[in-house]
Amino acid sequence: MRHKNLVILAILIALALALTAGSCDVTKKRVKLRDLDPKLKQYEGTKWDGLKKEKIRYVVSGSKDVDNWSKQSAVVYASLIQAENVIEIAGKDVEKLKKQKNSAAEKEAEKNVKLAQDILTKAAESAPELLSQGQELANNYKSLIKDATKLPAIASALSDSLSNLGKTIKESPDTVKKLTKVGKQLAQL
């Protein structure tokens, strides 16, 4: 049953994209660091902001349920991007910190690694709910297409969301390993 609904959803997305290729103006919003966790607002625009380099966007379709799912899927993927950025910066800092013994920089790196771990944990905990919401959207696909003018945006939102979730599933195991390694290195300083 679940597979059948996902196939129906995929067919609807493909049909909508085929019918509207190039003919719709879809609104996209950008995920901000504070969307991952309010504690991260202070790092927006700094070297610790992984979303400054890699802009993660989600589609706003006008369908509340689709838009919520679209944003949450983007936030989960953005969490992974943020963790990768923290790994890159903290990994470089570990070598410098060994030589300098700079406790303020050390604490900042440790704080960001801890925040990245918390964000990834939160993202992992939200995954079952996201999958459930996706299943619900697939089960209720008829209610999504009541307004044909929203169909291109809805299809785009669903397509982008599935892409974000797919990338997250593929990349997250390596990110968790690298983040754990950097965290251990920082703890040994």
Image (tube, grey):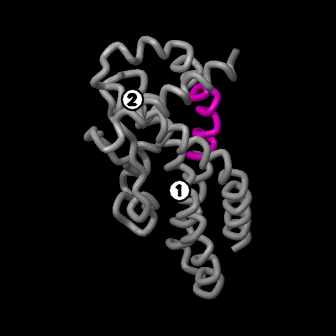
Q: Main secondary structure of the magenta part?
A: helix
Amino acid type, callout 1: Ile
Question: What span is in magenta?
Answer: 119-131
Q: Is residue 38 magenta?
A: no
In the rendered image, residue 92, in percent from the top left (x then y), is placed at 59, 78
Give the secondary structure at mark 1: helix
The residue lying at 63 percent from left, 34 percent from top is 125
Are there few (<14), some (14-19), or many (20+) residues within 10 Å of tag 1?
many
In the rendered image, residue 101, in percent from the top left (x then y), is placed at 60, 81
Q: Which mark is residue 140?
A: none
**Residue placed most toward the observer, 166 or 6:** 6
Residue that badge 1 annotates: 81
Are there few (<14), some (14-19), or many (20+) residues within 10 Å of tag 2?
many
In the rendered image, residue 177, in percent from the top left (x then y), is placed at 74, 58
Judged left or right of residue 150, residue 138 is right
The residue lying at 42 percent from left, 28 percent from top is 68
Which label lies toward us, 2 or 1?
A: 2
